[in-house]
Image (tube, rainbow, N blue to C red):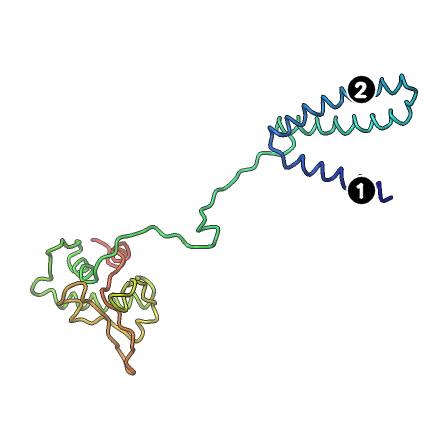
Amino acid sequence: MGKLRRARESALWVFDWYLRLDWVGKTIAGIGAVAGMISSASSFFAAVEQGITPLIGLFLALLALVLVGVLTLIIMEITGKRNPQRTVTKTSPAASLGMVVQKASERVPVVDALLYAVNRVWPGPEDKLKDGQDNPAIKALFRLREAAGEGQITVWGQLSPQHLTVAIPPVFWVTNQFDIMSVVFQDADESKTEPATFPISSEVYQNLKVDKVQVEELWPRA
């Protein structure tokens, strides 16, 4: 029984090895199988001449059966009947890790978003708020805070000049707001947040920016 079990395990190992081959390897194996059958036939006739037909004949018959089976598998593999063609969907590494990939968009200073909200046109490098536009810009800033708190728009900022720019979480805007003076009346890189309630928050973001596409979605062009 032990020898039979080892023989079966060896046969399974050979079969598994065969299945791991590509079509070139299987073709080569098929050629070897045909050569083996020819060699087996020669051995069979030699066995007949030597008078040991029963033992050698049975062994050669089993060997020929195995070789024919292997050759059949090769033919089926080449013709595509053994494994139906499967459609493979390629996924990016990020998708395979469950990451959400978003199309990159341009980030603009908050004051540019206010100018767009007032004029519905993106400002140039030298454009500033004109006389009479301060109040509409401040109202737009209040709306921007509400949208940021609701998650409609993402505001980006730094906790210090040495920190990386990060997305400010929506919950931050529950107790914090834009510092109107720095956003509307100072340079863009001096814009910052400030606490809106007490106790005063220790986190203050600066150099505030927003996503250009999200701003256009918040204030669609007429």
Q: Position of residue 188 (x, y in %)?
A: 17, 63
- The local crowd at label 1, few if under 14, some if 14 to 19, many if 20 or more residues have their Cα within 10 Å, is few
Relative to 204, say whether 72 is above or below. above
Q: Quadrant of residue 62?
A: top right
**Secondary element type, mark 1:** helix
Whether residue 191 sits left or right of residue 155 in the image: it is left
**Residue drawn at (29%, 83%) of the image:** 199
The residue indicated by pointer 2 is: 41
Q: Position of residue 200 (x, y in %)?
A: 28, 80
Q: Quadrant of residue 109?
A: bottom left
Relative to 139, say whether 213 is above or below. above
Q: Quadrant of residue 111?
A: bottom left
Q: Residue furthest front?
A: 50
Q: Position of residue 70 (x, y in %)?
A: 71, 29
Q: Are marks 1 and 2 in contact (CB under 8 Å)?
A: no
Mark nearer the N terminus (1 vs 2): 1
Relative to 130, say whether 33 is above or below. above
Q: Quadrant of the N terminus?
A: top right
Whether residue 177 sits left or right of residue 99 in the image: it is left
**Residue drawn at (72%, 39%) of the image:** 13
Whether residue 74 sits left or right of residue 104 in the image: it is right
Question: Identity of the amino acid at label 2?
Answer: Ala
- The local crowd at label 2, few if under 14, some if 14 to 19, many if 20 or more residues have their Cα within 10 Å, is some
The residue indicated by pointer 1 is: 6
Instruction: Looking at the picture, tell me which residue is in the foreground, 176 or 57.
Output: 57
- Distance of label 1 from label 2 (alpha carbons): 26 Å
Question: Identity of the amino acid at label 1?
Answer: Arg
Q: Residue furthest left?
A: 131
